[in-house]
Image: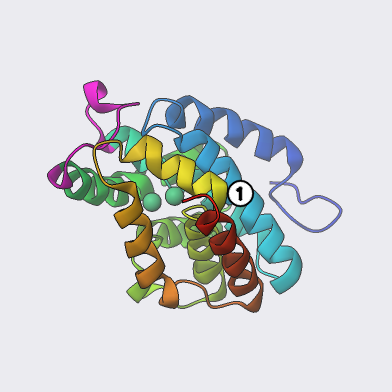
Amino acid sequence: MVANAEGSVFTQELEEKLKEICKKYLTDSRPGDWEHTLRTVEWVKYIMSQEGGDKDILLPAAYLHDIGWHFSLPKEMRNKNLNSVENLKTYFKGHLEYGPKMAKEILQRLNYPPDKVQRIVYIISIHDLPELVKEKEEVILMEADRLDRFGRAGLERSRKLFLAFDVKSIVKRYEMESSSWFCTETSKKVFKNLLKEMESLT
Ligand SMILES: [Fe+2]
Ligand SMILES: [Fe+2]
């Protein structure tokens, strides 16, 4: 694999190819998963611009982090809201099992360097388990992913995903749990602003 001028192997060409693959699966997944993925990628790019981090690891991980939902959800459940706690638990667990496997397969098909694939796959396997998140790239992906639960976009996403639930109480729970989610100064600041934005809308 050839590195670009910045010494990165995650070239624009590769990003386009990966985007196309992810779009196919994530537009047939939970409602809004593709848009959520694109926003997560944007947050990763922003946090990296302030805090550093390995682009070759973080960008593929951001595109692929929720790919497991497509495989975890039965066909008839795709693009439908998750309307029971049982559904949430079952398919959530599945997305952390299928996600790493599918990410590995996709990146290998794209001839991504094996050491980087291994790291990306690990980060995807723990992206929704804050208690296991330790290293910089793990932190940045978790932050970017979870920032998208807040602000206008986060609120709209919760409404689509949890139609049958009381969205206000979900937002409250997120707010209470979020103290351990944001570690970098950049994300802490963004989080504060998104909270304000969301509070003015609820
Ligand atoms: Fe996830
Ligand atoms: Fe996510």
Q: Amino acid at mark 1?
A: Val
User: In the image, is residue 146 above or below residue 165?
Assistant: below
Q: Which of these two is toward me, 1 or 61?
A: 61
Residue sitting farthest toward the right: 5
Q: Position of residue 88 (x, y in %)?
A: 22, 46
The quadrant holding residue 140 is bottom right
Q: Which residue is mark 1?
A: 41
Asked if residue 84 lies in the magenta stretch, the reply is: yes
Q: Position of residue 78 (x, y in %)?
A: 31, 26
Q: Position of residue 151 (x, y in %)?
A: 55, 53
Residue sitting farthest toward the top: 76
Q: Which of these two is toward me, 150 or 137?
A: 150
**Horizontal arrangement in the rendering, residue 31 relative to residue 164 (left or right):** right
Residue 79 at least partly seen: yes
Residue at the (39%, 39%) spot, across then down: 159
Residue at the (73%, 35%) spot, across then down: 13
User: In the image, is residue 187 above or below residue 38?
Assistant: below
User: In the image, is residue 162 above or below residue 186?
Assistant: above
* SS label for mark 1: helix
Residue sitting farthest toward the left: 86
Q: Which residues are magenta?
A: 72-86
**Horizontal arrangement in the rendering, residue 112 relative to residue 71 (left or right):** right
Residue 108 at least partly seen: no
The quadrant holding residue 67 is top left
Residue at the (56%, 74%) spot, across then down: 136
